[in-house]
Every structure is written in C-alpha cells, then in structure tokens.
C-alpha cells in the first residue's frame, strides 16, 4: 500500500511488538528495577518480515474482505465456549489472547459474555 501511495520502494518490513515479554512483565510486577532495565535494554521489539508484492496484495485483499464482512454485519463471533478454550501450547483462553485485542470487541456479544464470565470468576 505504501509503495503504491508514495511511489517509494520498500526495503524492509517489520512488526513492532507492543506487548512486553513475559520476563519483563514479571520483573515489573516484582519491582526489580535493575532487572527491568536490563531486560528493556536487551529487548528488541522489532520482528523483521520478508515482503513480496504478490503476498502483500493477497493480505490487503483478505483484510478488506474481512472489514467488509464486519461492516455488513456478516461477521459471526465465535461461541462463548471457544472464547474460554485454551489451545495446546497457549497460556490464556482465546477470549483473552485474541478477543481483547480486537477492534470489534465492544460490539461483540460473545466477548461481552466472556468478559462477564471472567469478571465473575466462572
């Protein structure tokens, strides 16, 4: 998209991780300032990605189709059971790991039910 809008070649592409690593969160919770500083100094939140124009076009198209479905109210939220499910190798339920980061979560009945159940300890 940037390439088309700006007419500029793309040399590199990356994602900047916004969630701190588990070790850093634990050090913050413990109040270990020297460990927090060391972990921040060693943390590289940039994840480099390979970029290919064809794949980029596919992703943009897929993203656009998803947005269209949501706007047309064709988006089907997963059932509450799915939101409570913890997949193998994961620490948090789907509703915590995925849904809490979703832009549509406040208009999603499944997320509302999940949040209510989690708040009540069920």
Image (cartoon, helix red, strand yellow):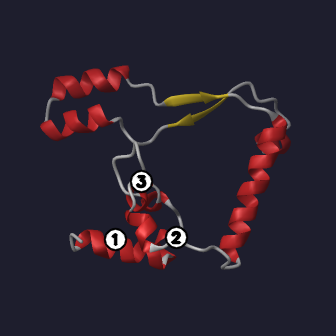
Number of residues whose C-alpha sits closer than 10 Å to that of mark 1, classed few (under 14), some (14–19) or many (20 or more): some
Q: Residue at x 34, y 47 (%)?
A: 91
Q: Is residue 33 above or below residue 3?
A: above
Would you identify the image quadrant in which residue 4 lies? top right
**1 horizontally vs 117: left or right:** right
Q: Residue at x 43, y 58 (%)?
A: 94
The numbered disc on residue 115 is 1
Number of residues whose C-alpha sits closer than 10 Å to that of mark 3, classed few (under 14), some (14–19) or many (20 or more): some
Distance from the alpha carbon under mark 1 to that under mark 2: 14 Å
Would you identify the image quadrant in which residue 95 lies? bottom left
Of badges 2 and 3, the one in the foreground is: 2
Q: In this figure, which residue is indicated by the disc labeled 3?
A: 97
Distance from the alpha carbon under mark 2 to that under mark 3: 14 Å
Q: Position of residue 49 (x, y in %)?
A: 64, 30
Q: Position of residue 117 (x, y in %)?
A: 29, 74
Element under disc 2: loop
Work out whether residue 118 or residue 82 is closer to the camera in this orientation and state it: 82
Number of residues whose C-alpha sits closer than 10 Å to that of mark 2, classed few (under 14), some (14–19) or many (20 or more): some
First in residue order: circle 1 vs circle 2: 2
Distance from the alpha carbon under mark 1 to that under mark 3: 12 Å
The numbered disc on residue 40 is none
Q: In this figure, which residue is indicated by the disc labeled 2?
A: 78
First in residue order: circle 1 vs circle 3: 3
Q: Position of residue 15 (x, y in %)?
A: 57, 36
């Amino acid at each position: 998209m940037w390439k088309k809008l700006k007419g500029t070649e793309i040399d590199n592409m990356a994602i900047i991780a916004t969630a701190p690593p588990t070790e850093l969160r634990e050090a913050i919770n413990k109040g270990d300032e020297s460990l927090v500083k060391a972990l921040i100094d060693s943390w590289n939140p940039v994840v480099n990605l390979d970029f290919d124009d064809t794949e980029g076009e596919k992703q943009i198209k897929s993203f656009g189709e998803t947005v269209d479905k949501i706007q047309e109210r064709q988006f089907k939220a997963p059932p509450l059971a799915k939101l409570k499910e913890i997949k193998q190798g994961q620490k948090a339920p789907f509703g915590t790991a995925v849904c809490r980061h979703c832009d549509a979560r406040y208009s999603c009945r499944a997320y509302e039910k999940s949040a209510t159940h989690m708040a009540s300890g069920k």
